[in-house]
Image (cartoon, grey):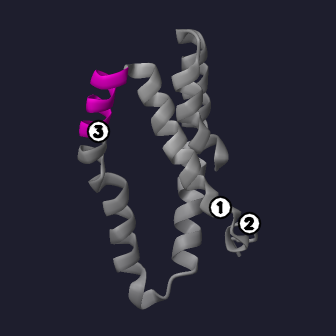
Amino acid sequence: MQLKRFGGVAIGLAPDLGLAVVATLALGLVIGPMAVTSTTLGQQHTPDALRGRTNSFNLLSAYGTVPLATVGTGLGIAAVGVTATFAVCGAISAVGALFLLRSGFRTASID
């Protein structure tokens, strides 16, 4: 999961287009399997009565924040440029990855 979080930083700090493309490709290769694993774990560990609400919240947090993030990214690019904005967005995601240090995430399994 850390590769996904640090992908934005790698793209933002890439010194040329070729390396940015490689970083984007690597990021794209891990997103699909991570999404499947995350969804499966979430559904296995959520009681049946709450599964619909939980999935609705997950979808809202993933897709409902896109308009806000788009505006913020546009403002960031206008203020400090593309490279710095990508690096900041990646750093924010990397900070969010700190919750993965919790033991429940490190020992999760799909049975």
Q: Judging from the image, what secondary structure is the residue with disc 1 in?
A: helix
* Residue 72 tag number: 3
Q: Earlier in the sequence, mark 1 or mark 2?
A: 1
Identified by mark 1, the residue type is Leu
Q: Judging from the image, what secondary structure is the residue with disc 3 in?
A: helix
Identified by mark 3, the residue type is Gly
Q: Give the x, y percent position of residue 59.
A: 35, 61
Q: Earlier in the sequence, mark 1 or mark 3?
A: 3
Eyeballing the image, is 55 above or below 65?
below
Q: Are marks 1 and 2 in contact (CB under 8 Å)?
A: yes
For the residue pair 3 and 84, the one nearer the viewer reads as: 84
The residue indicated by pointer 1 is 100
Eyeballing the image, is 22 above or below 32?
above
Q: Give the x, y percent position of residue 45.
A: 57, 80
The residue indicated by pointer 2 is 106
Q: Quadrant of residue 60?
A: bottom left
Q: Earlier in the sequence, mark 2 or mark 3?
A: 3
Magenta stretch in the rendered image: 70-80
Is residue 59 found inside the magenta-colored segment of the image? no
Q: Judging from the image, what secondary structure is the residue with disc 2 in?
A: helix
Q: Residue at coordinates 73% horizontally, 72% vertically from top-left?
A: 103
